[in-house]
């Protein structure tokens, strides 16, 4: 039980650090959805992606859900394009590995669209997307190839700041099934239909 209090202390510190750095951190209610969906999703490769990880606040919410549901050693890959933030992200996640027995963290410095397109060989089953909203339609195109059938992608800021209309048109068509959870910023849950 003390581990959850340690986790909550670290989580609050990362949230405050994110805000002080001008990084728009997700709201705790969005984090609870990340933890819940990560807990209930079983990617084939047991790899979970945080695309646009900042300094790790959303990554920790994902790890919270992954930890109890992992059958072996799951990987949480955090992608951040800003060099300075990526260094802090790496330091933060390295210092937190002792809170998680079943999770290993990997930080990739780079553009999330590029990383998912060209640098991950396997398909993925779970992706949290919090990159530039104008890139959401392109990210959806990439995930059409990279997301395994039945896989789940969560897109932050479905309401504010609103992604392009093209994104909403795409998630309304095959191979996607979607729902927008009405949190403060809005969270689009987009599942790729199983073949």
Image (cartoon, rainbow, N blue to C red):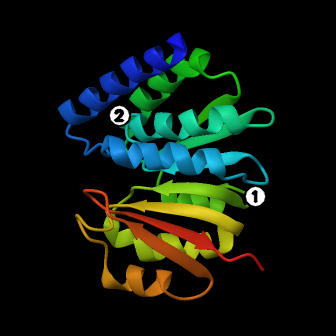
In this view, the mark in front (2 or 1)? 1
Residue furthest toward the front?
1
Q: Residue at x 31, y 79 (%)?
A: 164
Name which of mark 2 and mark 1 comes first in the sequence: 2
Residue 3, label in figure:
none
Left or right: 78 with respect to 101? left
Quarter of the image for residue 94 reads top right
Near-viewer residue (165 or 183):
183
- Quarter of the image where the C terminus is located: bottom right
Q: Find residue 7 and report its horizontal and vertical position in percent.
A: 46, 21
Alpha-carbon neighbours of circle 2 within 10 Å: few (<14), some, or many (≥20)?
few
Any part of residue 109 in sight: no
- Quarter of the image where the N terminus is located: top right
Alpha-carbon neighbours of circle 1 within 10 Å: few (<14), some, or many (≥20)?
few
Quarter of the image for residue 84 reads top left
Q: Is label 2 in contact with label 1 (beta carbons under 8 Å)?
A: no
Q: Find residue 151 and report its horizontal and vertical position in percent.
A: 66, 64
Position above or below: 174 against 152: below
Q: Report the Cα–Cα distance between label 2 and label 1.
A: 28 Å
Residue 122, label in figure:
1
Left or right: 115 with respect to 87? right
Where disc 1 sits, the SS reads loop
Q: Find residue 62 and report its horizontal and vertical position in percent.
A: 53, 41
Q: Find residue 183 and report its horizontal and vertical position in percent.
A: 31, 57
Near-viewer residue (13 or 53):
13
* Residue under label 2: 84
Q: Residue at x 34, y 62 (%)?
A: 132
């Amino acid at each position: 039980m003390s581990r959850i209090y340690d986790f909550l202390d670290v989580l609050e510190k990362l949230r405050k650090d994110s805000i002080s750095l001008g990084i728009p951190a997700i709201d705790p209610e969005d984090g609870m959805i990340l933890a819940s969906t990560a807990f209930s999703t079983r990617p084939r490769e047991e790899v979970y992606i945080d695309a646009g990880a900042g300094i790790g606040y959303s990554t920790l919410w994902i790890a919270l859900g992954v930890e109890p549901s992992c059958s072996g050693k799951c990987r949480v890959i955090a992608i951040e394009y800003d060099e300075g933030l990526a260094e802090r992200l790496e330091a933060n996640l390295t210092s937190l590995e002792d809170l998680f027995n079943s999770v290993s963290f990997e930080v990739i410095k780079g553009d999330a669209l590029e990383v998912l397109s060209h640098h991950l060989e396997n398909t993925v089953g779970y992706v949290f997307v919090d990159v530039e909203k104008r890139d959401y339609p392109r990210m959806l195109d990439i995930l059409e190839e990279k997301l395994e059938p039945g896989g789940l992608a969560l897109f932050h800021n479905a309401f504010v700041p609103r992604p392009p209309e093209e994104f909403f048109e795409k998630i309304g068509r095959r191979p996607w099934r979607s729902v927008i959870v009405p949190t403060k910023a809005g969270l689009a849950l987009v599942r790729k239909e199983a073949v």
